[in-house]
Amino acid sequence: MDREPESILFADDGETPNNPHLPLLLYRGAVGLEGPDPAANFERLFARNGWAHGWRSGVFDFQHFHVSGHEVLGIARGRGRVQFGGAHGQEVDLAPGDVAVLPAGCGHRRLSSSRDFQVVGAYPAGSQSQHQRPGRIDYKEALAAIVRTPLPDRDPVYGENGPLTRLWKGPAIARK
């Protein structure tokens, strides 16, 4: 049985649009860390579920968001404190095995982390991963692009019938 994620819907704060219909999903301890390269466990899982264009790094320390792509972040090593939802959002402690699924528009930035903090990120097929910063993009255009971003077909952790497919529903948004 799938573990139910924490679900947090952030309001538009006037600087960071967030997403008016889709919540941030937090899966705690969702991915096993066995083997010599825990990051590879996330990469294989995300790719198997249609989330590609992966990378390994950290989380930027400045507030940013993606207007035309959803993003998944898997914590492979270390610990980090990340603020989600923009400058007035929520601070969340992330640990190895945790996964955060960010809908298009969800602001995020790293507040602190251990030296060994390693994140594996990926995007659903067809998404664009360009990041934007509050105040550096036309706000109305950003909101329009966020709402137009198609829903992924699969949950990056649990696949075709995972919680994301049930929890991410928008009034005018269609699955790819």
Image (cartoon, grey):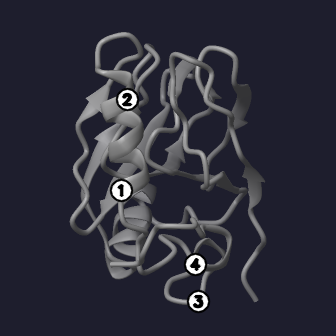
Q: CA distance from mark 3 to mark 1?
A: 23 Å
Mark 3 crowdedness (10 Å alpha carbons): few <14, some 14-19, many ≥20? few
Q: Position of residue 164 (x, y in %)?
A: 60, 71
- Disc number lying in front (3 or 1): 1
Which sits earlier in the primary sequence, circle 1 or circle 4?
A: 1
Mark 1 crowdedness (10 Å alpha carbons): few <14, some 14-19, many ≥20? some
Residue at position x 45%, y 58% from top? 38
Mark seen at residue 140: 2
Q: Are marks 3 and 4 in contact (CB under 8 Å)?
A: yes
Mark seen at residue 15: none
Say which residue label 3 marks.
161
Which sits earlier in the primary sequence, circle 3 or circle 1?
A: 1
Could you tell me the amino acid type at mark 2?
Lys
- Give the camera-side residue of 118 and 111: 111
Residue at position x 60%, y 55% from top? 22
Could you tell me the amino acid type at mark 4?
Thr
Mark 4 crowdedness (10 Å alpha carbons): few <14, some 14-19, many ≥20? some
* Residue 94, quarter of picture: top right
Residue at position x 52%, y 42% from top? 77
Say which residue label 1 marks.
148
Q: CA distance from mark 2 to mark 3?
A: 33 Å
Q: Position of residue 155 (x, y in %)?
A: 51, 74
Q: CA distance from mark 1 to mark 4?
A: 17 Å
- Disc number lying in front (2 or 3): 2
Q: Position of residue 161 (x, y in %)?
A: 58, 89
- Disc number lying in front (3 or 4): 4
Q: CA distance from mark 2 to mark 1?
A: 13 Å
- Disc number lying in front (2 or 4): 2
Question: Does 139 appear above or below 136?
Answer: below
Q: Position of residue 133 (x, y in %)?
A: 36, 18
